Image (spheres, rainbow, N blue to C red):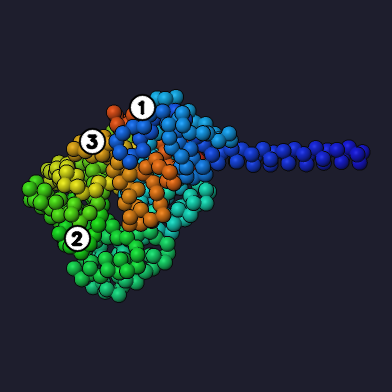
Amino acid sequence: MKNTRYIILIMIFICVFTIDAQTYKVKEQEQIKAFVNVNVLTMQDSITKMSQTVIVENDKIIALGNSNDINIPDNAKIIDGEHKKYLIPGLTDTHVHLHRKKSEEWMRSYVVNGVTTVLNLGGSKRVLKLRAQIKDKQITGPDIYTAGRGGVVKELNRPQYKEVTLDRIEERIIEDKAKGYDFIKIYGKMTIPQFEHMMKIAKREGIHAMGHIPRNLTADDALRIGQKSMAHTEEFIYTQFTEFDEQEVKDFATKAAEENIWLIANIIAYEKIELTWGKPQVMDSILRLPETKSLHPKIQRIYKADWYGSRDVKSRPYIEKVYKFYFPIVKHFHNAGVNILVGTDTVFPAAAPGESAIDEMKNLVKAGLTNYEALKAGTANAGVYINNFIDNNYYVGKIKDGYTAHMILLPSNPLDDLDILKEPEGVMLRGHWFNSIDLKEMVRWDN
């Protein structure tokens, strides 16, 4: 009997050891992945590199070259592009809001649509926790860079904004940096001294400031004081182009380009405002769509809130005029050399997380950018912006040696049709490969 027990114990030990060994071996194999026979848009230029091999080790791209010239490690996981599939960098949405309930679930929608990095413009402890959980691989989500609260001092968004002291502004910037926020959000109203002090302290503390143009000032003020990026195109209409004069836009765009300004065009958010303003029946129709019903329940509830459907329909002519003027602003800014970024303001009624970034790129094409330039706004441009202003150790937006392995595998060339971005065959997130089946499972909601 004793012998039998010993034999059983030995067998259990052997089985456990074998499982551990196999698990370790699998992990070792998955550390290296090779995309073979893929057509690569590196986003360093618009030229497609045909029949390439891209090697990924852990979370970094370590090699790229012609498939005939690259040696594939024996233990690599092979992902075959069959000489017809296209590999592009992961997308970046530079204007999102992740502080809402259940965001740890619905933010997987970004990844499913190839959005692998986001800039969150309204921070909280919840967002800091999400960022940490993603870094620790506890949950799946895009890389997060986040501002602190929606504005450095909440009183700046109230009638008594002039009473906010310079010391108070300085204290809050230092507090946000100490809490681990990546940048601060410009928001509300400010006096010129307040705005100048905010930008001075942010520069001194080495923390980037981005966001709205103070609503009571002008875009010229923002340019002079040193704001480098603006989060909504309508900010310029409210503060500078109040007469809807295209010549004024052209003149300002030249100055903005000389100052290396970045525009988060955010056409998609205002598109949804214009679509629903004073028309509750529009959102009712959107809620009945199958694609809406497939969204996370929390997102559907945000849609139902219909922020603009109950607004005064008499204001629609102005809203329509603002929306129409978006496109010449973006066009003239782009033509002048202003850097354009993709941002969506999600979660926003009728603007789905992830998918709306693709729709935004299509809006940029409508404004006059080429498909390549629009895709660059959502990839390489964003990578340069983050690296220059927020994290100089973060390299994304290109398929290049040493860059983070954020990539999307597509069935055909997105430069021919950006809609193909909505049909990924797989997404690589920090070197972890999700095939099409994995992506579908990622958006099966528990409630």
Residue position marked by numbered label 3 in the rendering: 370
Q: Is residue 399 placed above or below 97 in the rendered structure?
A: above
Q: CA distance from mark 3 to mark 1?
A: 17 Å
Q: Nearer the viewer, residue 365 or 140?
A: 365
Residue position marked by numbered label 1 in the rendering: 412
Residue 74: quadrant of the picture: top right
Q: Residue at x 35, y 67 (%)?
A: 205
Q: Is residue 264 left or right of residue 354?
A: left
Q: Earlier in the sequence, mark 3 or mark 1?
A: 3
Q: Is residue 236 left or right of residue 124?
A: left
Residue 334's x, y, as percent? 19, 44
Q: CA distance from mark 1 to mark 2?
A: 42 Å
**From this viewpoint, is residue 75 visible?**
yes
Residue 385's x, y, as percent? 31, 51
Residue lying furthest front: 69
Q: Residue at x 47, y 45 (%)?
A: 60
Residue 179's x, y, as percent? 42, 64
Mark 3, Cα crowd under 10 Å, few <14 / some 14-19 / many 20+, is some
The secondary structure type at the circle numbered 1 is loop
Mark 1: amino acid: Ser
Residue 371: quadrant of the picture: top left
Residue 46's x, y, as percent? 29, 36
Q: CA distance from mark 3 to mark 2?
A: 29 Å
Mark 3: amino acid: Thr
Q: Is residue 245 left or right of residue 430?
A: left
Contact flag, marks 3 and 1 (Cβ < 8 Å): no
Q: Is residue 119 placed above or below 188 in the rendered structure?
A: above
Contact flag, marks 3 and 2 (Cβ < 8 Å): no
Residue position marked by numbered label 2 in the rendering: 222
Q: Is residue 102 placed above or below 11 in the rendered structure?
A: below
